[in-house]
Amino acid sequence: MGLTNPGQKISPEDHARRVREMFARISKRYDLLNHLLSGNVDKQWRRAVTEKLRPLIPANASILDVACGTGDLTVALFENTDARAIGVDFCRPMLELAARKYPRLLLVEGDALQLPFGEAAFDAVTIGFGLRNLSSTEDGLKELRRVLKRHGRAAILEFSKPTVPGFRALSTAYCNYVLPRIGGIISGSRSAYRYLPDSVARFPDQEALAGLMRDVGFDEVEFQNLTGGIAALHIGRRV
Ligand SMILES: C[S@@+](CC[C@H](N)C(=O)[O-])C[C@H]1O[C@@H](n2cnc3c(N)ncnc32)[C@H](O)[C@@H]1O
C-alpha cells in the first residue's frame, strides 16, 4: 500500500504527517538507496542543477534549498557555486543526517508550504525530489515564488515521464517491481518505495509542470530532460 490509496482523499495535514513519518522511517537508508537504485545517476542530476543555475545567479547569491533532506543538493550548491545555501526540511531525522554529514551547512526545520522566510528573501530557490511530495504542487510553487526576489530563479529537479516509449516501459517496470522490492528490503519500508512510483505517476509531466510554473507567476520557464526524461530539471524566473 502506498501513502494513500488511489482515489482516497486525505487532508493536507494528514498528508504532511504521513510524508514526514515516511521519511523519518527511511532516513537512515535514504542516501544508500538513492545511490544504489539510481546507479549513482542521482549525483549527476544534482550536478545538473548547479551547472544550470550558476550562470543565472549573481555572485554570492543566497539560495534556499527546499525539502533538502540529507543535504546532498544543498551541499552541491554550496560547493559548486559561490552562493550561500540554506537547506530547509520538515523532517528532523533527515536534517540531523544532513547536519552530521555537512557540519558547515545552515539548516532550518520548516514546511515547504509555509516557509519560515519573508518575501523576496533569496536570489534562487531549489527543490530536489521534494515538490512531488507536497499536498499541493501549485501551492508549493507559489511558496517558492513568494520567497524569491524579483527575477530570481527557481530550479526544480523531479522525477518525470521518460520520453522514449521502449525506455518508458522499462523504467515503469523497474519502478513498479524492482524498486519497491529492493527499497523495501533495505529500508524496511516497502510502502515508502511503493509510494515513490505512485507519486511519480500522479505528478505532472514535463510540459504540465512548465505550464503550472507559468500559471503561478514564473516566466522564462524551460526544462531539460535528464536520463531520457526519468528526471527533469525545470527552471523559471520570478516575474
Ligand atoms: C525525496 S527527499 C529529497 C531530499 C533531497 N532534496 C535530495 O535531493 O535528496 C524529499 C524530502 O522532502 C521533504 N519534504 C516533503 N514534504 C515536505 C514539506 N511539506 N516541507 C518540507 N520538507 C518536505 C522530506 O522530509 C524529504 O526530506
Image: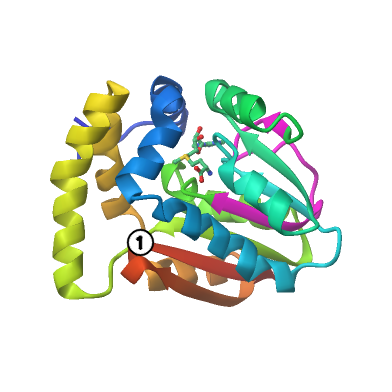
In the rendered view, tell whether residue 50 sits above or below residue 106: below
Name the residue rendered at 18%, 56% in the picture. 172
Name the residue rendered at 74%, 52% in the picture. 63
Q: Which residues are magenta?
A: 107-127
230 lies left or right of 118: left
| Occupied quadrant, residue 193 | top left
Name the residue rendered at 46%, 30% in the picture. 16
Report the residue marked by disc 1.
Answer: 160
- Nearer to me, 77 or 133: 77
| Numbered disc total | 1
The answer to whether residue 47 is seen in the rendering is yes
At label 1, counting other C-alpha atoms closer than 10 Å, the crowd grade (few under 14, some 14-19, many 20 or more) is many
- Nearer to me, 49 or 40: 40
The answer to whether residue 17 is seen in the rendering is no
Q: Is residue 72 magenta?
A: no
Across and down, in percent, residue 12 comes to 45, 34
In the rendered view, tell whether residue 100 sits above or below residue 85: above
Across and down, in percent, residue 29 comes to 40, 27
| Occupied quadrant, residue 225 | bottom left
* Position of the N terminus by quadrant: top left
Q: Residue furthest right?
A: 60
144 lies left or right of 204: right
* Position of the C terminus by quadrant: bottom right
Amino acid on which the number 1 mark rests in the picture: Ser
